[in-house]
Amino acid sequence: MNYFLIIIITFLVVEFLINLITRYFNISNISYKLPSQFSGIYDKNEYRKTIDYIVDKTKFANVSESIFLFFEIIFILIGGFNYIDIFLRGYFNSSLLVGVLFLWALILISSFLSLPFSYFNTFHIEEKYSLNNSSKKTFLKDFLKSNILSIILGGIIFLIVIYLFNRYENSAWLLAWIAVIIFSIILQYIGPKIIMPIFNKFEEINDQELKDKILKYCEKENFNIEGIYKMDGSRRTKKMNAFFTGFGKNKRIVFYDTMLEKLTHDEIIAILAHEMGHFRLKHIVKSIVISIITTGIMFYILSFFIMNKQLFSAFKMENLSIYGSIIFFGILYSPINYILSIISNYFSRKKEYEADNFSLKTTSKGSHLISALKKLSKNNLSNLKPHFLNVFLNYSHPPILKRIKNIKESLNR
């Protein structure tokens, strides 16, 4: 058997088993006994609802991932990629056009395969636990919009990369790397004003008192922002969130309308300070730099797999191509990417502690940060006691109880 195929199939199965085992431990770690720190936040029925939600989500993940794994392996073994490639080559002669269409076909296949699972998750599980506000019309529009965006944006950058690897040889990986960096920077600028409004409505917050408090805090921290916005997150979900988006003069603060409704002004300022901490402590810049470096390494390694006959043989391909090389290498690269994600999550959790500490130092609202985190956890039906293996592999944020412990220790120093 082709050794590339062995590596790919082995990783797909091993990753699935790791996730399965992790979810098993996670469920086994669950207790219906409410942690003392959340006494007065939940009643027994509310906490039981959270536990039931976690169990249902876990069962759903086990079923959906099993089905996806089955289809993915079968698709590879029967030469599904080759069927698509042969079909497109029968109608088009341009390798660039065939490459983009090949990518689009894979995007649509993956998207339509995931559609029933997404629908079930939204209108059965999220609906069952009173988290869903999305209508079927909104759900369908989101599905179409996200696919159109993926096709357009993915097609543009994929076309550029294919062209560069077709046109140049030794320097292609470097030029492709630079192209992706430029494309990513452009997206950072146009995202807040062009892409994000496609899905949600953004408007300046109308609570003048809160707005004045936010502006006063930003002025104190010498932090320039383009605007303070409310997003209609409640159109889809009852969950709460807040985030900064853009960079440079294009930075803006965005709050879900659900958060503005359920948190006090002091709690919102404490959360805002946490998010600002990521900027002030250069977390965003560091993440971008690391992403740029790892992308460059990926493109350099890719350059050694262009037109690799063994790699194409693993996917039952009859014809070699640049676009096939890129896609198949991406699949082969998955184990490395998985390891990098674990490392990235580790450092991300450390950054969350640092951002919490920044909020404490600049607002003196430690108790309000704790109460905000508790409300967020309750409202979003978060797992208060996830298994450490699940945290290690999958969590970009520390568990809520550890964050509260860190905040209390920082206040007592």
Image (cartoon, rainbow, N blue to C red):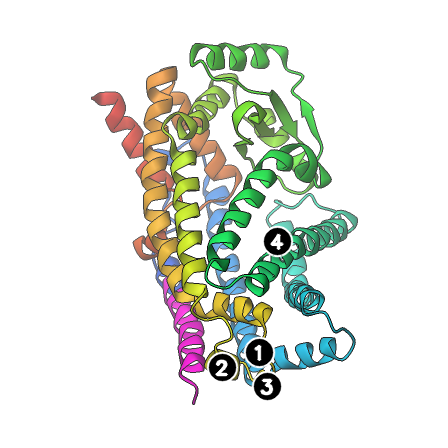
Q: Give the Cα distance between marks 4 and 2.
A: 25 Å
Whether residues under marks 3 and 2 lie with C-beta atoms below 8 angstroms apart, the answer is no
Q: Position of residue 237 (x, y in %)?
A: 63, 42
Does the stretch in magenta take in 326? Answer: no
Q: Quadrant of the C terminus?
A: top left
In terms of depth relative to the viewer, which is nearer, 94 or 34?
94
Q: Position of residue 243 (x, y in %)?
A: 53, 32
Secondary structure found at label 4: helix
Report the residue marked by disc 3: 78
Horizontally, is 240 left or right of 370 in the view?
right
| Front tag of 3 and 1 | 1
Does the stretch in magenta take in 12? Answer: yes
Q: Give the Cα distance between marks 4 and 3.
A: 29 Å
In terms of depth relative to the viewer, which is nearer, 342 or 269?
342
Name the amino acid type tagged 1: Leu
| Front tag of 3 and 2 | 2
Whichever of callouts 3 and 2 sits on the residue coming sooner in the sequence is: 3
Report the residue marked by disc 2: 309
User: Visible in this render: residue 334?
Assistant: yes
Residue 311 to residue 388: above or below: below
Check disc 1: other Cα within 10 Å, few if <14, some if 14-19, many if 20+.
Answer: some
Check disc 4: other Cα within 10 Å, few if <14, some if 14-19, many if 20+.
Answer: some
Secondary structure found at label 1: loop
User: Visible in this render: residue 35?
Assistant: no
First to last magenta residue range: 1-22
Label at residue 157: 4
Name the amino acid type tagged 4: Ile
Whichever of callouts 4 and 1 sits on the residue coming sooner in the sequence is: 4
